[in-house]
Amino acid sequence: MKLAGWGNWPVADVRLGQLRYADEAPARLAEAPSLIARGNGRAYGDAALNPELTLSMRGLSRVRVFDRSEGRITVEAGALLSDLLPVLIRAGWFVPVTPGTKFVTIGGMAAADVHGKNHHGAGSFAHYVDALELLTADGQTLICTPWDNAELFAATLGGMGLTGVILSVTFRLQPIETTWMRQETLACSDLDSVMAAFEESGDWTYSVAWIDCLASGGDLGRSLLYRAEHARPDELAHARRSDPLALPRRHELAVPFYLPGMALNGMTVRAFNAWYYRRNAARAGTSLVDLDSYFYPLDAIGEWNRIYGRGGFAQHQSVLPLDQARNALGAMLERIAGAGSGSFLTVLKRLGPGRSGLSFPLEGYTLALDFPVNARNHALLDELDTIVEAHGGRIYLAKDARAGRSVIEAGYPEIESFRALRAQSGARARMESLMSRRLGL
C-alpha cells in the first residue's frame, strides 16, 4: 500500500504488517529482509517507512501493570497516549513529558525520546523510562534498563526504532490534582523580548511561544509566550471543585478534504499571523485552561495536516545551542521573512541539557516550522539547514523528511557510535527505514 508520515510526504509503496501480540514479533521479523516499527504515523517524514515491511504496532496496545499508588506503568508499545490519558487522569496522574499531540503511541514516544514544554526543567521522556522490552535483530526479546543491557537501553531511547522493535515501556508518572492549567500569556514585541521572557520563566514548569515568522524589521520574532502550572483545586471555580479531575470536554472539528495548494501562501499566512498576534496580545494575562487546550491545541482539528494540500508539507525543527541561539534564530527568521514563504505554525521552546546518542534536545532553543512541499521551499529549507549547521545546532529526526547527511552528522557527534552499535548487534541490516537509508544510519 501507499503510506506516508504525518506530513503526507514522501509517499512510499510499502508492505504493511500487523502485530497484535508480543510473542508474534520474532515471526514478523523473519518475514522480510528488514523492517521498521510504526506507531500511529505521527513521525512527520520517512522515519516509519520501510518498503520491505512496515510493522504496525497499533494492535499491541494493552496496559500490563498500573501501580496507582506509586505512579508507575508498564504499557505495550502500540498504546495511544490519547487512550491512556483518561485512565491516568482519573487516577490523579499525568505523563511527566508529553509531545504536542496525544495521538502518538508510547513506543513512538520512547523511540523519538519526545520532549515537551517542560524540557528546560524536566528533561525528555527518557528520563522517566525504567525499562524497555525490545525485540533485537537476532530475534531475541531483551529487557533493557539503565543497569541491564544499558548501552542498548540508552541507544533505543531516541534511536528511532533502529536498534530493535520496542514491545513495551515501563515509565514513571507525575501526580496532578486537577485537569486545569493556570496559564499566563505574555505578548513579546520581538525576538529579544521573547528570549528574555523565556529566561525569566525558568521557574515555571511549562513554557512555549508562538512566533510570527513573517514579521520583519523591528517586529522580527514578535511572539506570544504561554507559560503555565498545573492548577490546584483551590484555584478552580467552586462548581469545578467537586470533581477537579473531570476529563476535558472539547468540540473537535476536522479538515474534511485536502485544501487547494494555493490556500497557504505568503499573503494568507501573513494576514493570519498579524490577526492572531493582535487578538491574543489584547488578551494577555492569566487564565485557567484545560489540559487539552494547553498541551494539545491542534488535536482539536482532526486531520489538520490536510491544510497543506495533497502535496504535503515538511517540518523543519532544529535546536540551537544557548550561546548561538540568538544569532541563529535571527538569521533564520530574517531569511524566512525575506522569502515571504511563511510557516503557518511556528513554535519556539527553551530546552535544558540533553542526552547522548540520537536524542534531539540540547540546551538552547528549538524552533519548529511547517512549509508546504515545493521547489521554492526546498531551497529555503536547505538554507535553514546551513544556518543550523554553522551555529552548532541539530535537526529533529522525528520531524525530518529531507535533510542531508552533512547537517545530521554535524549535529549528532555520537552518530558513529550509534552506527557501530547497530552494526555490532545486526540491527543495521534488519532494522531499517527510508530515513536510515537516506542518512546512512
Image (spheres, rainbow, N blue to C red):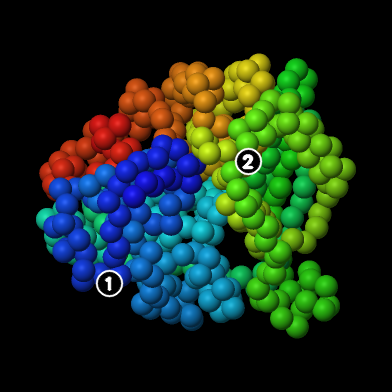
Marks 2 and 1 sit apart, C-alpha to C-alpha, by 39 Å
Q: Mark 2 or mark 1: name the one nearer the start of the chain.
A: 1
Cβ atoms under marks 2 and 1 closer than 8 Å: no
State the image quarter where residue 64 is shown.
bottom left
Residue indicated by mark 1: 21
Q: Amino acid at mark 1?
A: Tyr
Q: Which mark is residue 290?
A: none
Residue at 63% in and 51% down? 255
Q: Amino acid at mark 2?
A: Leu
Position of residue 175 measured from the top left corner of the image (x, y, whole percent): 57, 71
Does residue 333 show up?
Answer: no
Residue indicated by mark 2: 259
Does residue 25 show up?
Answer: yes
The answer to whether residue 353 is above or below residue 254 is above
The answer to whether residue 101 is above or below residue 49 is below
Q: Report the side of 68 relative to 195 (left or right).
A: left
Residue closest to the far right: 282
Position of residue 329 measured from the top left corner of the image (x, y, whole percent): 59, 25
For the C terminus, the image quarter is top left
Residue at 21% in and 68% down? 24
Helix, strand or loop at label 2? It is: loop
Position of residue 369 measured from the top left corner of the image (x, y, whole percent): 57, 34
User: Mark 1 packing: few (<14 Cα in 10 Å), some, or many (20+)?
Assistant: some
